[in-house]
Amino acid sequence: MSAIPVRPEELAGTKRENYINWSHTVKDWLLTVDHKRIAVLYLVSISIFFAMGGVAAMFIRLELLTPKGDLFRSDVYNRIFSAHGIMMIFLFLVPSIPATLGNFLIPLMIGAKDLAFPRLNLLSWYLYMIGGMFVLAATVFGGVDTGWTFYTPYSSVYSNSQVALTILGVFIAGFSSIATGINFIVTIHKMRAPGLTWFRLPLFVWAHYATSLIIVLGTPVVAITLALVAVERVTGIGIFNPNLGGDPVLFQHLFWFYSHPAVYIMILPGMGITSEIIACFSRKRIFGYPFIAFSSLAIALFGFFVWGHHMFTTGQSMYSGMVFSIISFLVAVPSAIKVFNWTSTMYKGTVSLKSPMIYALGFIGLFTVGGLTGLFLSTLAMDVHLQDTYFVVAHFHYVMVGGSLLAFLGGIHFWWPKITGKMYHEGVAVGAAILTFIGFNLTFFPQFIVGYIGMPRRYHWYPDEYQFWHVMSSAGASVLALGLVMPAVYLILSLKYGADAGPNPWRAVGLEWTTSSPPPPHNFDEIPVVTWEAYEYDADYTDQVADESTRQEISGTVPHPVSDHMGTYGNPPGE
Amino acid sequence: MSVEALHDGHSHGESSDAHESFAHHYVNRAQQDEAYIVGMWTFLVTEIMFFGALFAAYVIYRVQMPEIFDEVSRDHLDVKLGFYNTLILLTSSLFMALGVRAAQLKSKKGQLFWIGLTLLCAFGFLGIKYKEYSHKIELNLVPGAHFVYEGAHAGNAHNPSEAELLAASKPSYGPDRVKATTGIAVKRRPGDDVKKAEKAQIFLGLYFIMTGLHGIHVIIGIFLLGILWFMIKYNHPLAKDFMPIEMSGLYWHFVDIVWIFLYPLMYLIKPSLELLLHQ
Ligand code: HEM
Ligand SMILES: [Cu+2]
């Protein structure tokens, strides 16, 4: 079977039924149990919270333009950066990739009709929304001023802000992530198509498996810890209050026991996306597949043993500090393995710089910088100098914005044709990707310097000599903002004006590309039988040919380059 | 029970049944059953981590203040009532297991009977907990605005006035912001060891939080099993499936196991066998 089977209705120009157009009522969207629709619901709501967190960030950068805190009072400033951190971390980054792309793609990638528990999936979205509403309500009714870390006893005793309400929101949102984690674990274990062994899985799926493990093991701990803070606030029992015999460092242990692994919840899915994109746009089998797969698991495992590196200077014993320092160095090894493998994949590959690829390259570069500065911070003596400075702020923005966010955007650009069936304007997208990269570095690189020379985090009054760096950073932030608003515009426009994408515009391998775009309600007309390995890219298949054949394929004349072994539209070979 | 055992006993044996049904997104019934079991176990892992954080806090404070834990536990927790509750929960686990067995044997009567007994045990457990809690509430041992720890003064006839309590409650160290911002401070009797009352409050706080969270799980269990009981009784199609009872069973055993850790940790801090025997 080498010729592409063209559906009669496609030749006639009519659309076949897909997950979007089979019904149009609001009820069918809000009560859907289709993982693809839930992913879209998540995508929309997550973007809204991202925008709100972004507005808070803009206020922060505006305030920091001048050394005097002349725009906001200090307590208002505290509320703004807290709102920024809480929304960005708990309501955007943690669910971002898993709940949208993971939700949409995992069943498609493993040849299943849905996640194992579709209703749990819908429940997870509602929990997320309820949690988000509580956080919003807290912001409206006075805000919270503890920072996203809720350190005790400030949060549990002294703060005069909406700590309890915010914590309730984060607590509930935590359960939405647990629901997603359980769903992914079961789905990946039990719903794979026949023939799809673990080592034939796309690395995206491996990454989500590791992420889900972290979610399942870590989230309950932070949930109960935050609940304890709320209980302490309400009843005055002193579990975390040194005045009452409690131990505030215990809070930090419990909090970071989740929150360090949580940074891997944010980055691992991004690594999964990068593996997919790099392989596709280098047209090469990914280098060292098993190493990348196992390094995800290694990160998930080691990630649970380094939390103490957040507490070097806050009352933890020196000896635990030393142990945590060493283990933190070790956890960088699996991350580095991935970076080496991606670079080796590109080596002698046929690299084409499409917009998703530019995001992925940006990811690799920025994540590397972020990871390496993490090593600076894990060095015990160095951290005494750098703790609670802008150096730390720059470090985690390099990994979370430069890493996770760019990967998220790369993934959205890569799978947008699959999700919506439309192509966006490639030239503009490349422009936005480059603008984002430049704006990002302009914003955050100066923060390494200003932090190193002494600017503490979470302050808005600062000595005049730091102003130069802050102005640079704020200028960069406006470029970055432009780079982030652009995709919102052209992606939405593409829904109306974009060209039809066809099932596989990038000539990518992977089961999700074998079904039509957007996928039909039940993903595959027939459950595929997998007889090939992952990433079987055809080396001499050049970009130009790809473009050519995309155009022709839509009119249905050219052989499908990967159809020889993959079938098309999910028909198993030989059908 | 292991997943394999379950399948030998159930799906494979039943696969010839005509009425066998499964949700549309599964390939077959076996896949659905396995998904449910894996999902349930994963959920139980999250539960373990949930309680695990509390147990960690407990261990840390017990190491930091062993005498207080010992004293408060001896003076204010009732070993006997705790022991009855342990017995009750253990027995209920047995009943639950027999209920699951009855489901494997497809005996509707058996399921109703054993689930009924399990439910009875659950209510008995809550009854005893209610007695324990209300006793402590009377003694003002609930952490919060009304907490009074009498410690060594227990049985002292003098009942301090509100003013006396407040005066004694001014911490002699640190800022008095606790009271100022939350309106809450630990009330102490004049002459009480300042730190002691607060430490006692931490122990009792952990006691209430941990047994309370466990109690909430028991209540959830009652709802689960209650609904299941009615579903079986009225031949609800879902209850024909083996999975609901199997999963409720796993959940119930988990609740039981948590208590098996809570009882010795809370009630039996010093080897208290003699306490139990001589009380
Ligand atoms: C490559 C391995 C990494 C190492 C060795 C590392 C190390 C560290 C260390 C030692 C700190 C504490 C700095 C201080 O407070 O003084 C820190 C902070 C932080 N890191 Fe990393 N990191 C790594 C990767 C990541 C990743 C991948 C993310 C997120 C995607 C991340 C997010 C953060 C955040 C959010 C903080 C600040 C937390 C706060 O205090 O608010 N890190 N990192
Ligand atoms: Cu960390």
Image (spheres, coloured by chain):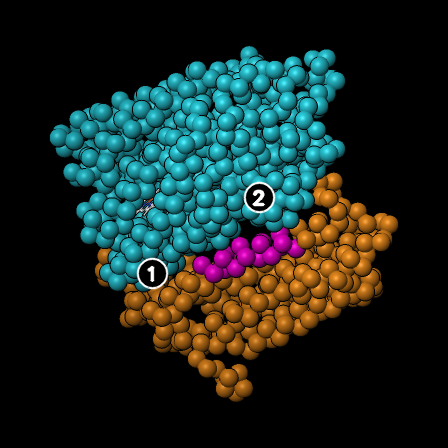
Chain colours: A cyan, B orange
Q: Is residue B49 magenta?
A: yes
Relative to B120, A138 lies left or right: left
Q: Chain of mark 2?
A: A
Please tell me whether residue A79 is drawn above or below residue B272 in the rendered image.
Answer: above
User: How many residues crowd mark 2 within 10 Å: few (<14), some (14–19), many (20+)?
Assistant: some
Foreground mark, 2 or 1, reads 2
Give the mark count.
Answer: 2
Instruction: Give the residues in magenta.
Output: B37-53
Relative to A304, B27 lies left or right: right
Are the residues under badges 2 and 1 in a single subunit?
Answer: yes
Residue B243 picture location, percent across and down: 72, 55
Please tell me whether residue A146 is drawn above or below residue A517 in the rendered image.
Answer: below
Whether residues under marks 2 and 1 lie with C-beta atoms below 8 angstroms apart, the answer is: no
Q: Chain of mark 1?
A: A
- Name the residue carrying label 1: A246
Q: Residue at x 17, y 28 (%)?
A: A467
Quadrant assignment, res A302: bottom left
Three-letter code, disc 1: Gly
Q: Residue at x 37, y 66 (%)?
A: B61
Front residue of B109/B31: it is: B31
Q: Is residue A508 visible?
A: yes
Q: Main secondary structure of the magenta part?
A: helix
User: How many residues crowd mark 1 within 10 Å: few (<14), some (14–19), many (20+)?
Assistant: many
- Name the residue carrying label 2: A200
**Disc 2 residue: CB within 8 Å of ligand 1:** no
Q: Residue at x 73, y 34 (%)?
A: A574
Please tell me whether residue A104 is drawn above or below residue A484 in the rendered image.
Answer: below
Residue A432 picture location, percent across and down: 40, 20
Which mark is drawn over residue B128? none
